[in-house]
Amino acid sequence: MYFRIHSYLDTFCVCSVQFEMEKFSSMLKFAVSYSRLRSLKTLQKRCISSSYKLQYKWEPDDLKLEPDVPEYETLNIKIQGYDFPVLESFSKYVYRVASNMDIDCSRYPVPAKKLDINSLQFQSKVVTDSFKLNYYERVVQLQNLPSTKLQILLEMICGNTPEGVNVTLKENTLEDEEMLYIPDHQKRKIEQMIEDLELRRAK
C-alpha cells in the first residue's frame, strides 16, 4: 500500500511537471508571437510613414524654392565732410559693414575741393576774415545690391553717422565715372582749337 501511494505520488508529480512545462511553452510561444506581431506593426508603420514622406518629397526640376529678389545695378554712397580723419574712418566703417553683409562693394577717393571763405562786415563789402577750407569726399560703390539688404545697410549708416559728415545715396552716372580719371589738358586744348577753327570756317 505504501509503495502504491508512492507510485501514485510520483505519477502525480510527473503529470504536474508536464502540465507546467506545457503551460510555460504555450506562454513562451504567445510571447514570441506577440513580439513578432509588434515588430511587424512597427515595421509597417515605418514603411507607411516613409512612403508617406517620400510621396510629398518629389519636386519638379524647374521648381525655384527661393524667390527672385530684385537687385540694384550700381549705387554710390557719397561721404563728404571737412574733417579728413573722421571722414576717412567713417568711409572705412561703411565699406566694412557692406563687406560683412556679402555685398559687392568698392571704395575710392575723390579729389578734395579747395574753398575760400570770406566773412564780410554787416551791410558792406569789407572783408573782415578769410578762411581756406578743404572739402573731402569718399565714395563707396555698391554693385548688384539686393533690395532686401538696402534698408538694413541704410539703418546701420544713419545710426552711426558722425557730426559734420554728409551722406548721399545716388545712382552711378557718367559724371561719376569721369571723376575717376585724370583729365588730359593737352587733349582738351586741341579739341578747343578744332572747335575754334570750325567756327571761323562757318563764318
Image (cartoon, rainbow, N blue to C red):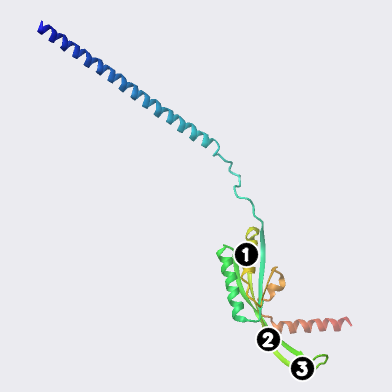
Q: Which residue is mark 1?
A: 153
Say few, some or many: other residues with alpha carbon within 10 Å of mark 3 (under 14 / 14 to 19 / 20 or more): few
Q: Between disc 2 and disc 1, whose residue precedes?
A: 2
- Position of 153 relative to 85 (above/below): above
In this view of the protein, can residue 175 be seen by the observer?
yes
Q: Position of residue 173 (x, y in %)?
A: 71, 69
Tell me if 66 is positioned left or right of 188 in this view: left
The three-letter amino acid code for the residue at tag 2 is Leu
Say few, some or many: other residues with alpha carbon within 10 Å of mark 2 (under 14 / 14 to 19 / 20 or more): some
Q: Secondary structure at mark 2?
A: strand
Q: Which residue is mark 3?
A: 127
Mark-to-mark CA distance, 1 and 3: 45 Å
Q: Secondary structure at mark 3?
A: strand
Q: Residue at x 61, y 66 (%)?
A: 156
Front disc: 3 or 2: 3
Q: Which residue is mark 2?
A: 133
- Position of 134 relative to 71 (above/below): below
Q: Position of residue 161 (x, y in %)?
A: 63, 72
Q: Between disc 1 and disc 3, whose residue precedes?
A: 3
Where residue 19 sits, quadrant-wise, is top left
The three-letter amino acid code for the residue at tag 3 is Val
Q: Residue at x 76, y 81 (%)?
A: 191
> Which one is in front, 108 or 131?
131
Q: Quadrant of the C terminus?
A: bottom right
Mark-to-mark CA distance, 2 and 1: 31 Å
In this view of the protein, can residue 181 be seen by the observer?
no
Q: Between disc 3 and disc 2, whose residue precedes?
A: 3
Q: Secondary structure at mark 1?
A: helix
Q: Position of residue 105 (x, y in %)?
A: 60, 67
The three-letter amino acid code for the residue at tag 1 is Leu
